[in-house]
Amino acid sequence: MMCMVIFALCMNACKTRGTVANVSTVELTGIYSGTLPCADCPGIQTRIELQPEGIYTMQTMYIDRSEEVFTQSGKFEWDASKSIITFDNDFVRQCLLEDNTLFVLVDGEKHTGEIADSYILVKVDMALVEKYWKLVELYGNPVVANDSNRGEAHIIFKIEGNRFNGNAGCNRILGSYQIKEDGKIVFSQAIATRMMCLNMDIEDKFLQILDTADSYAIQDDTLVISKENDSLARFVVVYL
């Protein structure tokens, strides 16, 4: 009888200790993305894809240093008792998983300093990315297509490199975005081509939104971009 109790205790301990066998039973698989600190560049764009078999793929790119993307794959272990993922590489060794967010641990500890936000990788929202979002409303007013303009106002969020592209109603646009915790979003490095159209009102407001927006929400096929809970723009998915 005692042997059976010891065996049961051992089995329970093994289940909660960081093996990959239980990876598929927790909601950690997916793509996590963010920009980690860099000693001699603005940051290291980092993307980690976790697969249910306990396998990961990590991509890194050093901003303003090179366009080269470094890719490595390996195995990770999931410690369900501590919510910690351990990778078999030295760049990102361990992460704490909380609310669809990976907190990169430094010497096994969560960073709490002034740049703590720079040690965060947020799970990619698959409802947002790789879709054609058509602009239908600006500051509460419907967007009406203008034949004099050169394109339909829209935006596409790409997984690769946390980049976006689209059209502001006249000019093509592109730039970077970063998803933060709790539905927060930050746009940066937005640029546009320099063609002139007869009506630039939509474009001017669209570009202004990219400078001021701080959050987003998706319901069904509708995307709303806001600032401090005030709706700035509304988009709908166009299935191409």
Image (cartoon, grey):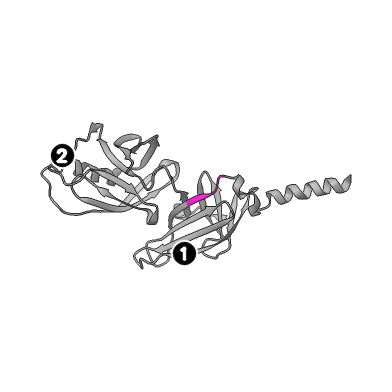
Give the residue displayed 66% in from the left and 54% down from the top.
19
Task: Say few, some or many: other residues with alpha carbon within 10 Å of mark 1 (under 14 / 14 to 19 / 20 or more).
Answer: few
The residue where tag 1 is placed is: 71
Q: Nearer the viewer, residue 159 or 32?
A: 159
What is the residue that sits farthest to the front in this orientation? 240
Q: Mark 2 points at which residue?
A: 146
Q: Residue sitting at 56 percent across and 61 percent down?
A: 93
Question: Does the magenta portion include 6?
Answer: no
Q: Position of residue 114 (x, y in %)?
A: 45, 54
Residue at (22% x, 51% y) in the render:
172
Q: Quadrant of residue 240?
A: top left
Question: Could you tell whether 161 is left or right of 171 in the image?
Answer: right
Determine the secondary structure under disc 1. Answer: strand
Q: Which amino acid does label 2 sit on?
A: Asn
Q: Which amino acid does label 1 sit on?
A: Thr
Q: In which quarter of the image is residue 76?
A: bottom right
Residue range highlighted in magenta: 27-31
